[in-house]
Image (tube, rainbow, N blue to C red):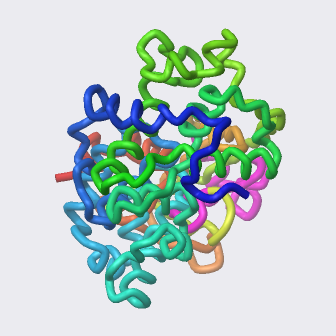
Amino acid sequence: MSEVGGPRADLPTAFAPLLIDWQRRAGRSGMPWQNSRDPYRVWLSEVMLQQTQVSTVLGYYARFLERFPDVEALAAAEADEVMSLWGGLGYYSRARNLHRCAQMVVEQHGGRFPSTSAGLETLPGIGASTAAAIASFCFGERVSIVDGNVRRVLTRLLAFEGDLAQTKPQRELWEMAQALLPIEPSADDMTAYTQGLMDLGATVCTRSRPACGQCPMQGICQGYQVGEPQRFPVKTRSLKRRHESWWLLVVRLTEGPERFWLQRRPASGIWAGLYCPPVFESELAAHAGLPSAWVKRLVALDAVSHSLTHRELRLHPLLLELTSEPLPGEWPAGQWVDAERLVQHGLPAPVKLLLQALRAPDLFARP
């Protein structure tokens, strides 16, 4: 294995200086987490930005910092409140790991994040690339991020033929990423370099239509020189998506304070730990156990499609409006939740939109 940062004759030594110079001249700036060496703020932004666009993250980031201004505040929060503020961002395991990580930082590290990428990787939800981002931005560590955007940039730069669906080529590319690092950089150089990797992949070396004419690496990019930059990265294993249909039994109590019947989803699987109307695998299963009079009152609402990483869900809401609570034993496990308190519960995005559509439009407005 090559020594991290050691120059290699087969790699372009001009890459790091070009990238640092370009980032300082033309890279992105002005995002609220930039120009900060606070590991809490950088960590929060890095977790939120995983598989999520910057434009989406901006509002969530501001709300999180307003409610949880530091790691101690996040660690002390109730899990339901954390999930509620996360609702709509998707990939909810990130929120659960975020909360657990904050608690570990407080309980085991006195409220201070480890200052090395190796130490950061021991925390829940922090993988190698996120650890590298925090360590380089906040502590000036000479280590490279290697997320999806960076893999694309580097495989095109090097015309890297390794199949990234396999472990060995992934490791080889990681080693090359470390070998491309600037030599003896200052902390400011590492910030510009790391941000430059992110910016180049997000704004120039994009997946489908790379702007090669605007790229500072055009003169040294082997993918461009062979005329096939979009052929990289090579990844043969395609994602297999499953298609599922779910029926949601949406029960609303209309007399007195408006309430909905919700269940907490299991601790693992889709929407783990979130609140949701009871889920059934068929309309017949949703009917089973209900009094026949209630089955006749069910109203089928418009079906909704919802995409997850490995699945396509087709959601079929069945609305049942009641004027009084069912007797114990007549009902699936769960709890009544006041409509005004729905925002305090973590709800999957499509469920949130569904309940919002059934109520006043300002229910989910935030101050």
Residue 202 at least partly seen = yes
Residue 326 at least partly seen = no
Residue extent of the magenta highlight: 271-300
The residue drawn where x is 68% and y is 41% is 313
Between residues 343 and 59, which one lies in front from this camera angle? 59
Q: Quadrant of residue 139?
A: bottom left
The quarter of the image holding the N terminus is bottom right
Is 289 in the magenta? yes
Residue found at the very far left of the displayed protein? 367
Taking the image as shown, residue 10 lies to the left or right of residue 260, namely right
Residue 170, given in percent of the width and then of the height, sits at: 73, 47
Between residues 338 and 102, which one lies in front from this camera angle? 102
Residue 86, given in percent of the width and then of the height, sits at: 40, 57
Q: Quadrant of residue 153?
A: top right
Is 250 in the magenta? no
Between residues 43 and 219, which one lies in front from this camera angle? 219
The residue drawn where x is 57% and y is 32% is 12
Taking the image as shown, residue 202 lies to the left or right of residue 149, namely left
Residue 72, given in percent of the width and then of the height, sits at: 29, 80
The residue drawn where x is 31% and y is 56% is 187
Residue 292, given in percent of the width and then of the height, sits at: 70, 55
Location of residue 171 with respect to 164 vertically, above or below:
below
Between residues 230 and 364, which one lies in front from this camera angle? 230
The residue drawn where x is 49% and y is 67% is 117
Location of residue 163 with respect to 115 vertically, above or below:
above
Taking the image as shown, residue 328 lies to the left or right of residue 62, namely right
